[in-house]
Image: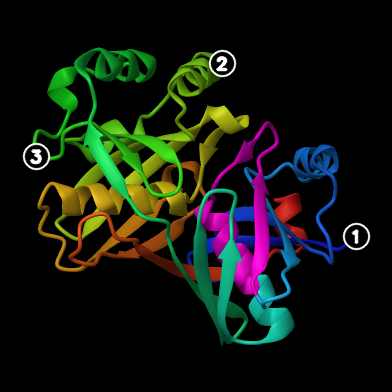
Amino acid sequence: MDIQCISAFSDGDTGGNPAGVLISDAHPSVEDMRTIAADVGFSETAFAEPQGNGAWRVRYFSPQSEVPFCGHATIALGSALTREFGPGRYNLKLNEAEISVEGAVSGELVEAALQSPPTRSQPAPDDVVSEVLDLFGYTKDQIDPRIPPALVHGGADHFALTLNSREAVSGMTYDQETGRKLMEEHGWVTILIAYNETPQLFHTRNAFASGGVYEDPATGAASAAYAGYLRDIGWPHDGRIEINQGFDMGNPSRIVAEIGSEKGSSIRVSGTARVMNESDFTD
């Protein structure tokens, strides 16, 4: 069983978010996929099997649960498919959506881009906002009033909290078990904490207690959902935003989200992916 370890949304040949990728003629059993994902230990592992029409059936598992869509694992999968079968576009059938990923070789890296599922968002209720603020120890006066807290979706549900200082984002801390219970109660995959440096540049952190992981260094699904939300509220994105994630945890990751004009349409999320080497596991 050849499980590939690929770091998606890397900052060149460093950083990124590690994902496991297993390409096989048929998916292992659900129990085996759960066990494999737990053994791999990354925030997600993507499992892909070929379909008769040239598409790929894909499922994603974290160490703790199955998730409907994972952006960084999709980028990692696109990298693996590109290296094995060549550059191009690959159609993917997920549990609840059909998407695509493209890959192109760039030296030792693969540049990959996915089209997310459709996006949607809605304002977060005041009582839910208070729960999230209490979890992280933030206060209402730290919220950026231009980008109110929201429930965002781009293939999976997330909570988005935009703060008014980079320092507040950098200082993110929370109790993982309390966070897990809150995320499971509301059905959120992650809680995204963001700071807007310029209209097109954001710094984010993503709490991922629902998947048994304290923090995700690069979260393509949440980035797609957040980009869709920015479009919903009329943010001056000029068709594209860049997201720096993972820098505060020593795993620099860079994500590009291209935003179309049609409300609810998918977001194109791209970045580079690198095959992990021995030093990634010994540093």
Q: Residue 146 carries which label?
A: 3
Q: In this view, does 149 lie above or below 70?
A: above
Total residue callouts: 3
Whether residue 65 is situated above or below residue 197 in the rendered picture: above
**Range of the magenta residues?**
55-79
Q: Which amino acid type is shown beneath numbered disc 1?
A: Met
Amino acid at pointer 3: Arg
Quadrant of residue 257 in the image? bottom left
* Camera-nearest residue between 98 and 7: 98
Task: Check disc 2: other Cα within 10 Å, few if <14, some if 14-19, many if 20+.
Answer: few
Q: Which of marks 2 and 1 is nearer the N terminus?
A: 1
The residue labelled by disc 1 is 1
Residue type pointed to by label 2: Glu
The circle on residue 177 is: 2
Is 65 one of the magenta-colored residues? Answer: yes
> Is 213 positioned to the left or the right of 50 in the image?
left
Asked if the magenta segment contains residue 232, the reply would be: no
Camera-nearest residue between 182 and 68: 68
Alpha carbon of mark 1 to alpha carbon of mark 3: how far? Answer: 49 Å
Eye-nearest disc, 1 or 3: 1
Residue at image position (23%, 58%) is: 201
Residue 51 in picture, x, y percent from top left: 72, 70
Q: Residue 16: in sight, yes or no?
A: no
Q: Of helix, strand and loop, which one carries label 2?
A: helix
Along the viewing direction, whichever of 143 and 257 lies nearer the viewer: 257
Q: Distance between the residues labelled 3 and 2?
A: 31 Å
**Sequence-first disc among 3 and 2:** 3
Give me the residue at 47% from left, 23% from top. Answer: 183
